[in-house]
Amino acid sequence: MKIINAILLSCLLTVITSGQAATLPEQPHISVSGAAKIAVKPDTVRIQFQSIALENDADNAKQVVDLQVQQVLSQLQKNGFDQALLTRADVQLRPEYEYIEKKRTQVGIKATRNLSYQLDDLEKINKFLQILVKNDISNIGQINYALKDPLQWQIKARDLAVQDSINKAEGLAKSYHASLGNVYSVNYHNNNAQPILMRAMESDQIAPSYQNNQIEINERVEAVFLLNP
């Protein structure tokens, strides 16, 4: 059995070595990696929040939530926010319980409606949050900063990573008194721009304030260049 395992291991190593060798040219070459990182200010944000009410019955709980949402919509319109950018889910109803004298007791019906707003003018985010707090929306969830067109920034970062690989290859070739030839192969590692997630703190008196951070975009390439004699 040990002999068989040794033969299998030897065959596996031979296959791996052959596969790696097949990716490299037989003539003199140089392998380099290029990397780039750019920081971009986000230009859009999605704000998630909830309208919640606890009443004695389902109809009253739903009416309170509906009224609260209508008040938010009215205030948004008065302050120049586009109502069409507000996404509203259906109202969810469930019984609410508390333990009173060690006994599970229903205290009412809780109505919850999940909402989110896509805001492209980041200068208005604090004003938007103030509107929510003034309308008794205290359960503000994730605030998702992102880019409307992340692809253009990824392309810019990738071009910088490519140029970085070229600069490294040229510098190494010069150090070894060689002449850099054409590129033989490229291995590209795609890294999507990651949004910035923030969570609001609940406050009954003061609206939370936010300053948007920067989104980092990282790109990396690996390249093999031929060396001229």
Image (cartoon, rainbow, N blue to C red):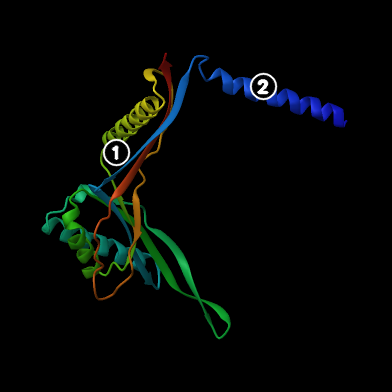
Compared to residue 48, the image places residue 155 above or below, namely above
From the top left corner, tell me how far across and down residue 95 is, in percent: 47, 68
Give the quarter of the figure containing the C terminus. top left
Q: CA distance from mark 2 to mark 1?
A: 40 Å
First in sequence, mark 2 or 1: give its number: 2
Which amino acid type is marked by label 1?
Answer: Pro
Write down the residue under mark 1: 150
* Left-right relation of 22 to 164: right
> From where the camera sits, is residue 188 visible?
no
* Left-right relation of 191 to 204: right
Q: Nearer the viewer, residue 88 or 152?
A: 152
From the top left corner, tell me how far across and down residue 27 is, in percent: 49, 14
Q: Nearer the viewer, residue 34 or 195?
A: 34
SS of the residue under disc 2 = helix
From the top left corner, tell me how far across and down residue 48 is, in percent: 32, 56
Write down the residue under mark 2: 15
Residue at x-position 39% and y-position 23%: 177
Residue at x-position 42% and y-position 32%: 33
SS of the residue under disc 1 = helix
- Of badges 2 and 1, the one in the foreground is 2
Q: Nearer the viewer, residue 69 or 40?
A: 40
